[in-house]
Amino acid sequence: MDNALRELYQEVILDHSRHPRHYGALEGASHKAEGYNPLCGDRVTVYLKLGENGRVADIRFEGKGCAISQASASMMADMLKGRTRADAEKLMEGFLNLVKGEHVHGLSEDDRETLDVMSGISAFPMRVKCATLAWHTFKNAVEEGAA
Amino acid sequence: MTTQTKIKPAFDVMAARADFPILTRPVHGKPLVYLDSGASAQKPRAVLDAMTEFAKTDYANVHRGVHYLSGAATDAYEAARRTVQKFLGAAHEDEIVFTKGGTEAINLVSYSWLSPRIQPGDEILLSVMEHHSNIVPWNFLRERQGVVLKWVDVRDNGSLDIDALDAAIGPKTRLVAITHMSNVLGTVTPLNEIVARAHAKGVPVLADGCQGAVHETVDVQALDVDFYAFTGHKLYGPTGIGALYAKRAHLKGMRPFNGGGEMIREVSRERISYADPPARFEAGTPPIIESIGLAAALDYMTGFDRNAVAAHEHSLLVYARDQVRQFNWLKVIGDAPGKGAILSFEADGMHAHDLATILDREGVAVRAGHHCAQPLMERFGVASTTRASFALYNRRADVDALIAGLAKARGIFGHG
């Protein structure tokens, strides 16, 4: 198999797509947004319970689509739970830079390592939108999705 | 022993492949296997050369100047119209309107012909396998004028139920708008029968021929179809040009579409009168160079025995379908008798986009998604499919590459 494909469809990603974490609606969500990519039909709904100062007290998602879009949503939920708003924004910026193949800075080593699993997407420009859908939806939920 | 002699179809795929320069380029280091001609076909040298040659020697704007080149360009543009006329079997050249493509052709009928002729509650009959370009222009009339869109279902194998269609044509039906060949299922609709049934109730028929014109031999007079729309780029021609065939009687009574130069008879400050068809519907400078390319593409296609080409494409379809069926994790969607060379399938446990990405790394270009036919996706309960579409330049080795790529994708997704 070629290396780029191996990077893209590595076991962690396939596992997240088959067994998504934090999957399903969130009772009593304070924020919610739906993301849809009309080109490929990927769908993600992000539910949030935001605490003081926008801390992500709880997060869940529902969705349908390709392995990349669903794995990305699952991994995002995993990472964002418990984060402060400032932290979440930093992670998002880091993620967006990573999948575009740009320089990533200002992240802890742990975060960097976790995100790195998705770095293979940068070799597939046609698929970057699949990976970023969940994160943009999260941002929409925080900014405009108050219940 | 039977003494039946079978004459082999006179089509040499390797010779045809040599006509398409792009087929020699690699993709991701692999030979290109282009199975996305249903979205847009590659261009033979004859088309590319005709356009370049025309631009080099005979180019100017049409229908305007008195100078030599303007005359030469006008002659070439009008000759291209006659080539389209011949290709579709139309009775008159003025029944051919050049458009930007199939989409514009259908929008033209919606705006200029149907819109002024309908009342709220009138019905337009569509099939569930229409491309969005044969849905949205009618939806405009639903939004703006209160017409009702009625949908004819397809059978589970993707074939059209002609009796169901017939039964759905009622006293309020103003138009049957239906594909000649589905871009997802490959289903070829029985146009002559559809037209006969619709006309028996006084209802005109528009056929979306964007796929049908590529794979079927069209004779609009024999079909007696009222409107036939097609696009050039799927017919091995350039982008930016297509055509609408419409019967003279319909065109005559149609209001103008875009306003501008070329489509007027006389303009004063108080009053404007419009040109006769087809000029009335060709406002502005038309796609002149593209018209030359389109004519070259049609000449290229008709240079083959089209039945032999169809037989070649069909043999590829059968070869591919029989192998795809052996993968129990793939489900073929659309198996209507007599269908065209389009193979759509759904993969169990794998999204079409993941599959298409993996195939792409093997140099195999397929289409993945809803194919601009969401009502059909809904009908079959799928979000998206992977589609391989075959053209005259495809060969069995292309199918072999597809099948090998599918097996590889399955392996990557943990079922190797």
Image (cartoon, coloured by chain):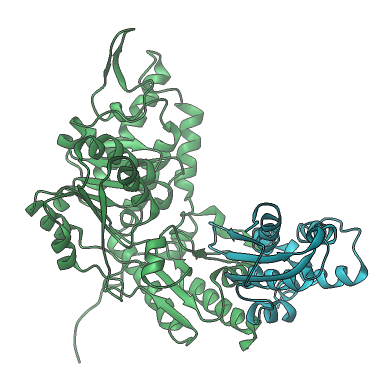
Chain colours: A cyan, B green
Towards the viewer: B19 or A141: A141
What quarter of the picture does the C terminus of chain B occupy? Answer: bottom right
- Residue found at x 46% / y 66%: B394
Q: Is residue B224 left or right of residue B236?
A: left
> Where is residue B34 drawn, in percent x and y?
52, 63
The answer to which image quadrant residue B181 occupies is bottom left
The answer to which image quadrant residue B94 occupies is top left
> Where is residue B205 drawn, in percent x and y?
20, 50
> Where is residue B327 drawn, in percent x and y?
48, 86
> Where is residue B321 drawn, in percent x and y?
41, 78
On screen, residue A29 above or below B149: below
Outermost residue, top side: B269
On screen, residue B281 above or below B109: above
Residue B29 visible in the snapshot? no
- Residue found at x 65% / y 56%: A146
- Residue found at x 32% / y 44%: B106
How many numbered badges does the structure rendering display?
Answer: 0
Outermost residue, left side: B200
